[in-house]
Image: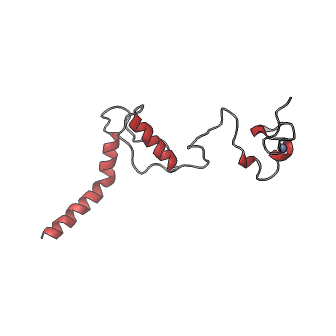
Amino acid sequence: MFATCRHCTKCKVNRPRGLCWSCYYTPGVKEQYPSTSKYARRGLGNFTGNAPLPSNPTTAVPGTPEKMAVLELRAKLKQAVFHPEDARYEGDPRPLEFMKRKYANVIRREQKDAQVQCA
Ligand SMILES: [Zn+2]
């Protein structure tokens, strides 16, 4: 008994993804069957191309459920899973420093607007 092709279920599997030779090389067929290799990247993060960086780093500490939720959200949004300014330990000032730099101009502008309104 040999493994049969996942697509035509007739031929012997002799190509990756559990497909036979002719199905594997038929345009559009192999795309319907994800890789069966345990070394292949799978799951939500399985897309090609350069993912854009998330707009903001997270203060969630690695290994916490909060951080896992952040990673999951980023993967769903097709963003890079890690941000270079993510917190690396409890109380890491890195993400907050980043936000301060990023929003410094916005905050200054808002303060100016507020002053105008009060005048
Ligand atoms: Zn086949």
Looking at the picture, tell me which residue is in the foreground, 74 or 104: 74
Residue 22: percent from left, percent from top: 86, 46
Looking at the picture, tell me which residue is in the foreground, 18 or 93: 18
Query: From the viewer's perspective, is residue 81 above or below residue 88?
Result: below
Q: How many marks?
A: 0
Q: From the viewer's perspective, is 18 left or right of 60?
A: right
State the residue at coordinates (50%, 50%): 77
Query: From the viewer's perspective, is residue 61 above or below residue 80?
Result: above
- Name the quarter where the N terminus is drawn: top right
Residue 60: percent from left, percent from top: 37, 38
Residue 47: percent from left, percent from top: 60, 47
State the residue at coordinates (85%, 31%): 2
Ligand 1's image quarter is: top right
Of all residues, the one furthest to the top in this rendering is 1
Looking at the picture, tell me which residue is in the foreground, 27 or 87: 27
Residue 61: percent from left, percent from top: 37, 34
Q: How is the image coloured?
A: secondary structure
Q: From the viewer's perspective, is 36 left or right of 102?
A: right
- Name the quarter where the C terminus is drawn: bottom left
When asked about the image quadrant of residue 64, the answer is top left
Of all residues, the one furthest to the left in this rendering is 119
Q: From the viewer's perspective, is 29 left or right of 91?
A: right
State the residue at coordinates (42%, 51%): 55
Q: From the viewer's perspective, is 106 left or right of 25?
A: left
State the residue at coordinates (45%, 49%): 54
When asked about the image quadrant of residue 108, the answer is bottom left
Looking at the picture, tell me which residue is in the foreground, 8 or 46: 8
